[in-house]
Amino acid sequence: MDFLPPEMLAFLIFFGFMASFIDSIVGGGGLISIPALMATGISPVLDLGTNKCAAVMGATASFAAFLRSGKIDGWLIRRLFPLSLIGSAIGVIVVRQVPPDILRPLVVAMLILVLIYSIVKKDWGTVSTYHGLTRRMLVLSMFVALGMGFYDGFFGPGTGSFLLFAFLSLGFDFLGAAANARALNFASNVAGTAFFVYFGLVDFSYAIPMGLSMIVGAWCGARMALRHGTGFVRPLFIIMTTVLVGKQLFDLFR
């Protein structure tokens, strides 16, 4: 592993911290970390794998912080976590055969619907109404976890937004939804990283310093969300989803 120049290290540390700080709360950190890696001159082939390897370090920290806070529903996550792992692994395998950009128009449309619904429903997610799941809703949630895991491994943009929206739909408030979404995002990151490493698509000289800064950023972000609650998470979710829609529209029409 080559040693990077000090200015490159500082660049990766700064943007890694910022990306994971936001990602640990509402997702969307890839909007910062992936362009930052590309700006360093890293090969496009290695960009996604290197980012995923760094992101899993931050995801571990935010998952641990939310787990210690008691905001994660252990019963539900124990049932969904393995499906997110499996889905992500399949997604990484498939992405080596199929161009992921075929999903972009659908993703843009879905993100716009998520954004509109979140803005219109002003009181949505302010108070938790979750009291467990029926068998039918559990089965549906399992399919969503598998599908979102696959999507994260295959394409990725908006995974955090979609997961947070899914948990809001189950009755969680914004903080509870963010915590449980982080748990499933951690699962898909673990599986994705393992397969990217296996296929040799990770540059560790970039991934390790960025990942270490992501640990700090994710921990700070999770603590910030826990301290300020739903009133902090909701507007940040709307802002990041808006930015994500704009980025995907730009890429679509470019």
Image (cartoon, grey):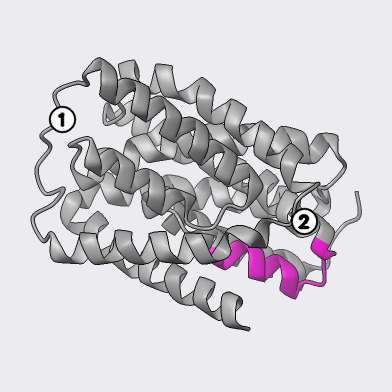
Kindly give the residue lying farthest to the bottom in the view shown: 254
Above or below — where is 118 with respect to 24?
below
Question: Secondary structure beneath disc 1?
Answer: loop
Dominant secondary structure of the residues highlighted in magenta in the image: helix
Highlighted magenta segment, given as a residue range: 31-44
Tell me the crowding category of disc 2: few under 14, some 14 to 19, or many 20 or more residues within 10 angstroms, Cα based: many
Kindly give the residue lying farthest to the right in the view shown: 2
Q: Where is residue 189 in the image (x, y as percent from the top left)?
A: 59, 39
Give the Cα separation between the discs numbered 2 and 1: 41 Å
Kind of residue sitting beneath label 2: Tyr
Residue 220, can we see it?
A: no
Above or below — where is 214 with respect to 179?
below
Which quarter of the figure has residue 173?
Answer: top left
Tell whether 220 sits left or right of 131: right
Which quarter of the rendering shows the C terminus? Answer: bottom right
Q: Position of residue 78 (x, y in %)?
A: 41, 17
Q: Position of residue 56 (x, y in %)?
A: 60, 41
Q: Residue at x 39, y 49 (%)?
A: 162
Give residue 130's mark: 1
Report the mark closest to the observer, 2 or 1: 1
Give residue 206's mark: 2
Q: Which residue is drawn at 8% across and 55% down?
A: 123
Residue 153, can we see it?
A: yes
Question: Secondary structure beneath disc 2?
Answer: helix
